[in-house]
Image (cartoon, rainbow, N blue to C red):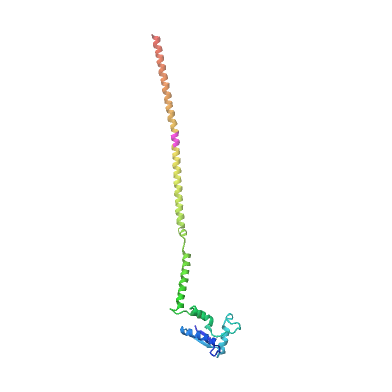
Amino acid sequence: MVIKVFLASSSGSTAIKKKQQDVVGFLEALKVDYTPLDIACNEDNRMWMRQNVPEDKKPANGIPLPPQIFNEESYCGDYDTFFDAKEDNLVYTFLGLPPPPGSKEAEQADKDNIVENGTHAEENLDDTIVPVEDRNGDSNKEVKQATDENEEGEGDEEEQEGAAKEETAESVGDEAPTVKEEEEAAVEETDEVTEDTEGQAEEEEEQEEEAE
């Protein structure tokens, strides 16, 4: 990639000269390879620059002034945008070049990458985390089903025990009157025997009296 800087070597404007010197001097300080293209002595350079500066970047009169900076065919910007990038330590980004290791821009890029990657990692982690309820959903369902079955089984046993107790109670209730009836029958038989004995005794006394 070749950085192209369009300059006017014979410009009568002091402001333009100063801006050109600032751009060239800073690029040389950063040891960035660039190619100066003079528009004052070369009409082709002048026409190419004017044609390739985007319309929205041109001044009101439609004639862009130097310095204008390109990366190959891609437009980077003019002096003002270059100055802003320099103030923000983003000159390499402005030029479309990778920052050299150890530079402030490289360190900032590393921090941005860490933050970006960390954010993505957290997002991916959140996406892959499966709630405990979902992970254990099937197991919980099986345990719950087994518990319900055990409770149903216990309920059936309790019902069976209750039914057995009721039957026992009914049996006892049925037997109790039978015993009572037997006792009453025995008393009645005793009374009848007593009455028979007394009757026999009276008859014997009457017979004895008649014999006398």
Residue 160 in view here: yes
Task: Give me the residue at 45% from left, 34% from top.
Answer: 173
Query: 33 or 164, which lies in front?
Result: 33
The image quadrant that residue 60 belongs to is: bottom right
- The quarter of the picture where the C terminus appears is top left
Asked if residue 174 is positioned above or below residue 190 in the image, the reply reads below
Is residue 76 visible from the viewing direction of this image? no
Q: Is residue 125 magenta?
A: no
Front residue of 106/157: it is: 106
Which picture quadrant has residue 53? bottom right
- Up/down of 152 relative to 53, above or below: above
Q: Residue at x 45, y 48 (%)?
A: 151
Residue 38 in picture, x, y percent from top left: 53, 89
Q: Position of residue 87 (x, y in %)?
A: 49, 79
Residue farthest to the front?
14
Residue 125 is situated, as x and y percent measured from the top left of the image, at 46, 66
Look at the picture and state if 131 lies above or below 75. above
Would you say the magenta stretch is mainly helix, strand or loop?
Answer: helix
Q: Please provide the residue range marked out in magenta.
A: 169-173
Nearer-the-camera pick, 184 or 29: 29
Q: Residue furthest right?
A: 61
Q: Assess whether residue 172 is covered by the magenta stretch.
A: yes
Q: Is residue 59 left or right of residue 85?
A: right
Query: How far across and down, in percent of the image, does residue 41 sit?
Result: 55, 91
